[in-house]
Every structure is written in C-alpha cells, then in structure tokens.
Amino acid sequence: CKELHKDEDDPEFMFQDRENIPEELVCESWISDMFFELRDKVEDMDTNEQEAFSAWLDYESRDLSKVDADDLVRKFNDEYIGKYDEEEDYAREVIEQCYELSDFVLNYFDYAAFARDLFNDGYKFLDGFVFCA
C-alpha cells in the first residue's frame, strides 16, 4: 500500500477484504496486534490445521483481544481431533478404535445414531473438522 500511495504524505489504508481473519481482529480501518501474534503461532500448522483453527475461532465465543495467543493455540490443540467428510465417518473411526465388535454386529450397527449421540454430547463438527468440547 505504501508503494502504491508513495505520492501521498499521509495515505489512509483500508482493509476492504479479508480471508481467515476473525471479525474481532480486523475492520475497515484497523487490524489488531493479536492477529499478528496468532498468525505467527499458526505458521507451523499444516493447511488442514490452519483451516480448522479458523473454523474453531469463528465458532468459539471469546474476546480475542483479551486472550493469550499461546493459551488459545494450546486450547485448540487440546480440542482438535481431525478432518472428516461427515460426522458418521468419525463415529465409524471411534467404533473401530475403541470397541471390539464382531463383523456380525458391525453389519447391524447404527453409525448414524451413534454419530448423532456423539455430536449431541461432547463433540462438535465444524466445516468438516471434529473437536471435542
């Protein structure tokens, strides 16, 4: 922006479009210092984790101007489970990893109902990402 407006003594910069920046960290005329702290914290995350972090921030209700960036990333890491196409995919994984059910039982298992129960009690599905509450 400074290069584009080098002929102006006091140019006014405006943020007219944004992507993956929580609303409380930017508006048309300013950007919070917390944005830069969070940006630095998530640089080491892979693309899926960055997208999950953004979805998680948008969902969670908190004043980002009053939180510690390290604590926020730590809480995210504690809650983030992974990326899934749908809730039922995560339910299937839970059944496979946590229960030893025979093939006979698995043929009749109601994964949709199990997923519904999981996500009504302790899990969140946000934009394809699963979090524990």
Image (tube, grey):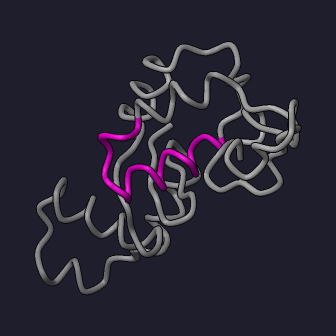
6 to 36, vertically: above or below: below
Q: Position of residue 92 (x, y in %)?
A: 30, 70
Residue shown at the point (38%, 62%) measured from the top left:
83
Q: Quadrant of residue 56?
A: top right
Q: Position of residue 131 (x, y in %)?
A: 46, 46
Q: Is residue 54 one of those drawn in magenta?
A: yes
Q: Is residue 34 left or right of residue 8?
A: left
46 to 28, vertically: above or below: below
Residue shown at the point (43%, 18%) measured from the top left:
70
Q: Is residue 127 left or right of residue 114?
A: right
64 to 114, vertically: above or below: above
Q: Residue furthest front?
A: 7
Q: Is residue 80 one of those drawn in magenta?
A: no
Residue shown at the point (31%, 84%) measured from the top left:
108
Residue shown at the point (88%, 38%) measured from the top left:
12
Q: Which residues are magenta?
A: 42-59
Q: Position of residue 7 (x, y in %)?
A: 82, 44
Q: Quadrant of residue 67?
A: top right
Q: Is residue 83 left or right of residue 106?
A: right
Question: Camera-side residue: 33 or 45?
Answer: 33
Q: Is residue 81 left or right of residue 18?
A: left
* Label total for image: 0
Magenta span: chief secondary structure: helix
Q: Position of residue 33 (x, y in %)?
A: 64, 22
